[in-house]
Amino acid sequence: MREPIVTPDNEAAETSPPAKTSSASASAVAVPLLALGLLGVAVWLGSMPPPQPEPPAQPGAVGPAGQPTVDPLPSWRAGETKQAILEFVEAVSTEGGPLFVPEEERIAVFDHDGTLACEEPYINALFLIERIRRLVEQKPDLASQEPFATLLTGDLEFARRLGQRLLTELAAAASEGRPLEDLEDDVRAFLATARHPIYDTPLRDVTFQPMQELLALLRRQGFTIWLCSGSSVHFLRPVATEWYGIDPSLVIGSRLRMTLREEAGDPETVAGSKVVVLPELEQFNDGPQKPVSIAARIGRRPIFAAGNVGGGDLEMLRWSQQGERPSFQLLVLHDDADREFASDAEADAVVALAEQSGWHVASMAADWERVFARPLDKMAMGRSPEPDNEQPAAAAGEAADTAPAATDPPAAAAPLEARPGS
Amino acid sequence: MREPIVTPDNEAAETSPPAKTSSASASAVAVPLLALGLLGVAVWLGSMPPPQPEPPAQPGAVGPAGQPTVDPLPSWRAGETKQAILEFVEAVSTEGGPLFVPEEERIAVFDHDGTLACEEPYINALFLIERIRRLVEQKPDLASQEPFATLLTGDLEFARRLGQRLLTELAAAASEGRPLEDLEDDVRAFLATARHPIYDTPLRDVTFQPMQELLALLRRQGFTIWLCSGSSVHFLRPVATEWYGIDPSLVIGSRLRMTLREEAGDPETVAGSKVVVLPELEQFNDGPQKPVSIAARIGRRPIFAAGNVGGGDLEMLRWSQQGERPSFQLLVLHDDADREFASDAEADAVVALAEQSGWHVASMAADWERVFARPLDKMAMGRSPEPDNEQPAAAAGEAADTAPAATDPPAAAAPLEARPGS
């Protein structure tokens, strides 16, 4: 055990209830998602709803800045994971204690999609579709060119199968020549009006309430919180600020290539000067690139890292664990088909990987009392019939060998690396 | 006038005393510098001195955190530039005032070499030479290969002529395979013992005291201070922390390409995981790249930018000026051959550029009561005879047309962009 936490890690993993999913569930979800996506985007593309009168509650993010309340994580159920979080945060921020970490080294990194918010569908895919729709107004022949033609139908399952890398490349192409500040203004305008196609609610409502509480707890205890995501940094910065109160300078994402454009101005003044987007993905921030990006940006190894298997986060979690300081790794497990999704096709393998790695699992089904700040209903036709979750659980090693469901590109893109025989 | 500062900018520039240098001075300085460099590096390579008993005074950086003293910039002489700094800082941090800028947008960016510290010689060249010396212990045949052979002689004039880009490329090559954290440890060890080859003092003594006071003033007024330099970010981060109290995450520099290396470990634990350097310069952070890097990293346009002509900072200054907020641009003028160097070959053109751009000039000779925290003597043979500075000053336009002295690569790399006829 490298990580000197009071609660042994493998005990924590073992005590988590068995994941309520199976490798068959992803494909079962995918078909209704497609239909749902079509309906959702039709609704969303059709008429932007007026701004919501009641902003979504974010008790974690806007809680009192003083002492933690009796329970700083009220949306987390009592259990090994909640206990381990509380003990770790207490230990590293207790001056004079054996695990004390100076405040400037209390760095936490969080993946975004699937870790802090629902990733069904990718919200940057929704933005991309809107962007293409506007682009077509100026360049009508794009509407008949693929992949734009299919994206314009609002086919979110298609967007999902493109994967984050290609989505980000398309976003670069669709943003060519746009000044950076204007592009981020576009994102803010999108976030202000877009609705979630499955939950039929403002997008920001699909952030995970337990994670908002965790962010607030870490912040109170002197942590600096960074996002590290595969999405374009220019898409994610407005999200970070508006949904989580995270400064844009603390967002690490995929980088679009940019250039400085200086234009002749009034002879009395200097030339106009803008940084504009070039139609090229400079760096895709996923998998092994995440630790590299963090090292390049932060210059300290994080002591707290949270991700999910579909988020390309395993390397980031491993790297955060190998520093000289005590550290904590949290893997969000999508095993709740009722309230969110059972999209982790091999939940048993995720749990086994976490167990052997000394990581902690946040099982949505078992560990979270609430998933969102307020209960959200999937739209009627979107409630997918879940397959029987009580089929015999495969042993971890066998589960890891199971080919990922073809309909689950995120899991396929980041295969589990559980070692056979462990 | 785009910049609504109380003191008109061109008035400030006009009131600055004429620069005490000429385009001839750079070549006059270069020859003794070469000799000096040889001697200095011989001394420095020969035997590392023991750690200095008395750390250099940094009153600005470690000053009281409460109210500013009567004069927050005691090393600045009364004059238009000092006055303009004080008024700007006061104006943007006065809540309810017409120029108020919210704290999260009070972003300041500083070039390093030549702006915050003496750049004669480049300190990263000193580190590179040490690095190559160690590399040769393992690969002796490097000692006969150029440019390593010449660098190993300690020829700092040669290093200077290589330029920052090539120096950084060589640093990448010489650091191949080094884990990032070890590389930065190497830099810290170097900084702890290396001496300045011209002033014969610990390296950190050559930071500019007036700029330390400016950093402290900005910090007290709620600014976040970033470095933006052409040096490798891994070299500059330890410098930033130890010399200026700037967190490593606030350093933007040239990027070395890196990769994640995961090694098999104890079966009970996860694999070892390190980010290591590849022998390639990923991005050189200079000139037009500086605004692009800042946009990619910070996500806000700085409202305060400081640089020097040799630092590739003109684009950064122009870009910072084009935001929606009030802003301040400061150009450090190297026109003090006695206390530092008169290395800005075309001082008149620098002043003219600043005047027409609405920027402020910090003339070392005229504006700074002290250059370093304590008076530093160049080593005896290093005191170069300065040419007569009272020769008739060329008109700004003519000065800009003068070819840069061949011995002054930094000025040649970033030619002045004064418009004829202005």
Image (cartoon, coloured by chain):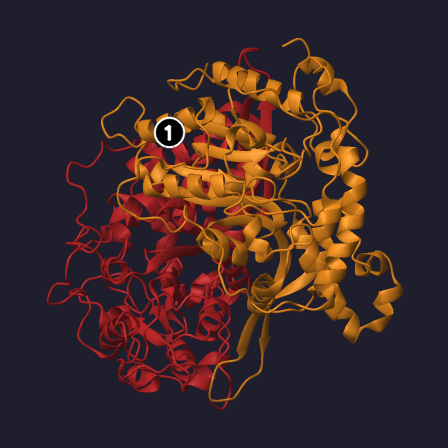
Chain colours: A red, B orange
Q: Quadrant of residue B18?
A: top right
Q: Residue at x 26, y 41 (%)?
A: B67
Furthest residue to the front?
B380
Q: Which residue is mark 1?
A: B86
Number of numbered discs: 1
Q: Position of residue A349 (x, y in %)?
A: 42, 79
Q: Chain of mark 1?
A: B
Question: With A216 as the anchor, is B372 left or right in this view?
Answer: right
Farthest right residue in view: B144
Horizontal and vertical percent position of residue A317: 44, 70
Q: Is residue B199 left or right of residue B384?
A: left
Task: Give the answer, above or below, for where B379 lies relative to B85.
Answer: below
Specify the farthest residue to the top. B421
Measured as percent of width and height from the top left, residue A366 is found at: 23, 73
Q: Residues within 10 Å of mark 1 (few under 14, many from 20)?
A: some
Give me the residue at 54% from left, 78% from top: B272
Residue drawn 73% across the image and 55% down it: B40
Q: Residue at x 50, y 69 (%)?
A: A315
Q: Is residue A270 visible?
A: no
Secondary structure state at the residue bearing disc 1? helix
Decide which of B281, B212 is in the foreground and name it: B212
Q: Could you say which is closer to the camera, residue B345 or residue B139?
A: B345
Q: Is residue B319 visible?
A: yes
Q: Quadrant of the C terminus of chain B?
A: top right
Q: Tell which residue pokes out farthest to the left in this image.
A: A70
Q: Nearer the viewer, residue B160 or A47?
A: B160
Q: Is residue B142 left or right of residue A392?
A: right
Left or right: B55 in relation to A117: right
Along the viewing direction, whichever of B176 and B15 lies nearer the viewer: B15
Identified by mark 1, the residue type is Leu
Measured as percent of width and height from the top left, residue B338 is found at 65, 36
